[in-house]
Amino acid sequence: MKLTATDASLSVGVPLTKVNGTAELTGATRNGKLSELSGVIDLPSLSLTTRDLTNAHAEIVKRSGQDAMTLQKIQAQIAGASVAGQIEWTIPRHRCQADMR
């Protein structure tokens, strides 16, 4: 599935606004629950709180049999500098919520 954002806002624990770019995702469910997910996120521009970022790229992975998801190989430009990192999180089994505007 390919998602395209144009000046979108996302609530992911911190406010993301002016989000422009794409996410290409593939996944699977078992017994009505997300079992696997992988994909690539490419965002030429977005704002994180009040900071503008450019050339943001990351890969998202949730492996079968694991509750954790990982946003890995994060790279972006902010305030004239390069940033990189990785984020791992767990979604409670009883609730998964996303707010996309």
Image (spheres, rainbow, N blue to C red):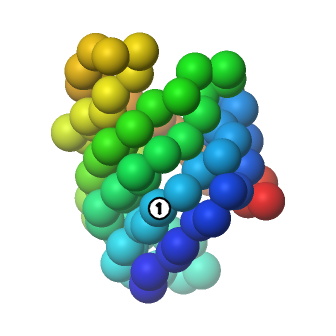
Above/below status of 45 relative to 32: above
| Residue drawn at the location 46% of the way across and 32% of the way down | 53
* Residue that label 1 marks: 21
Above/below status of 56 relative to 33: above
The image quadrant that residue 83 belongs to is top left
| Residue drawn at the location 30% of the way across and 61% of the way down | 40
Residue 71 in the image: state x and y as whole percent.
Answer: 35, 42
Give the SS element for disc 1. strand
Residue 50 in the image: state x and y as whole percent.
Answer: 67, 20
Q: Horizontally, is 15 left or right of 62 in the view?
A: right
Q: Quadrant of the C terminus?
A: bottom right
Q: Is residue 59 visible?
A: yes
* 10 or 87, nearer to the observer: 10
Residue 17 in the image: state x and y as whole percent.
Answer: 69, 41
Q: Is residue 27 visible?
A: no
Residue 81 in the image: state x and y as whole percent.
Answer: 28, 15
Q: How many marks?
A: 1
| Residue drawn at the location 32% of the way across and 33% of the way down | 76
| Residue drawn at the location 66% of the way across and 46% of the way down | 18
**Extreme residue in the front direction:** 80
* 98 or 22, nearer to the observer: 22
The image quadrant that residue 47 belongs to is top right
Q: Horizontally, is 88 left or right of 6 in the view?
A: left
User: What is the three-letter code of the residue carrying label 1?
Assistant: Gly
The image quadrant that residue 52 belongs to is top right
Q: Quadrant of the N terminus?
A: bottom left
Question: Badge 1, how many Cα within 10 Å: few under 14, some, many 20+?
Answer: many
